[in-house]
Image (tube, rainbow, N blue to C red):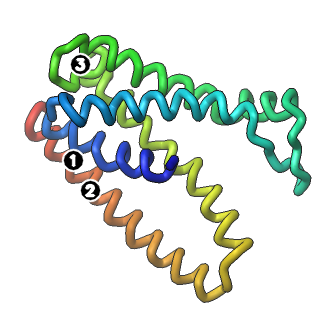
């Protein structure tokens, strides 16, 4: 589920920002679903064991300490921006994030950085389960997809600069 919502966010956010898409109807429902999911994910991360020096740690205090020292602040900032965006739109149908102009739009893009966190999980899975040849094939596919994604982002940025800059 996390991967599906992350792919949606990574694909839709640059598109919505570049073309100033109205978030109504199903897009509004998806925005609320995404915010709710990532909020629940913050709480889940306090209950998810972590590996320390190759040993699985499940003690809640140590897990919470690890999360608070890692991705908690970026996750909290991103989710807060999402909820503030939904709150500030208050029935209006545009994507002007936090009504703070272009800087607010950059905050929404920061949600994309969750993909780096997910990448570590995928790499761990691939190394434990797949053969060397399958790992190489996955790495090649990941490089190709990453190149396409970065190209997409750059195209959206240039379009945005040309449209609104």
Query: Residue 28's spot in the image, x, y percent?
Result: 26, 29
- At 32% from the left and 65% from the top, the residue drawn is 148
Where, by quadrant of the figure, is residue 32 drawn?
A: top left
Query: Residue 40's spot in the image, x, y percent?
Result: 57, 30
Q: Is 99 displayed left or right of 72 in the figure?
A: left
Q: Separation of disc 2 and disc 3 at Cα?
A: 23 Å
- At 51% from the left and 43% from the top, the residue drawn is 114
The residue tagged 1 is 156
Query: Residue 91's spot in the image, x, y percent?
Result: 20, 14
Q: Separation of disc 2 and disc 1 at Cα?
A: 6 Å
Q: Quadrant of the C terminus?
A: top left
Mark 2 Cα-neighbour bin, 10 Å: few <14, some 14–19, many ≥20: some
Q: Is 124 displayed left or right of 119 in the figure?
A: right
Where, by quadrant of the figure, is residue 108 drawn?
A: top left
Q: Would you place residue 94 above or below residue 148 in this image? A: above
- At 15% from the left and 34% from the top, the residue drawn is 21
In the structure shown, which secondary structural element does the residue marked by tag 2 occupy? helix
In the structure shown, which secondary structural element does the residue marked by tag 1 occupy? helix
Mark 3 Cα-neighbour bin, 10 Å: few <14, some 14–19, many ≥20: few
């Amino acid at each position: 589920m996390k991967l599906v919502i992350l792919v949606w966010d990574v694909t839709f956010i640059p598109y919505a920002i570049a073309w100033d898409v109205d978030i109504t109807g199903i897009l509004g429902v998806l925005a609320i679903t995404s915010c709710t999911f990532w909020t629940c994910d913050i709480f889940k991360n306090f209950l998810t064991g972590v590996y320390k020096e190759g040993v699985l740690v499940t003690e809640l205090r140590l897990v919470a300490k690890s999360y608070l020292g890692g991705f908690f602040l970026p996750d909290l900032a991103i989710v807060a921006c999402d909820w503030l965006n939904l709150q500030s739109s208050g029935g209006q149908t545009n994507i002007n994030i936090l009504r703070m102009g272009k800087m607010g739009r950059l905050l929404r893009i920061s949600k994309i950085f969750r993909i780096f966190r997910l990448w570590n999980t995928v790499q761990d899975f691939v190394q434990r389960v797949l053969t060397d040849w399958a790992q190489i094939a996955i790495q090649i596919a990941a490089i190709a997809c990453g190149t396409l994604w970065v190209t997409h982002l750059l195209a959206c940025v240039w379009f945005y600069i040309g449209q609104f800059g």
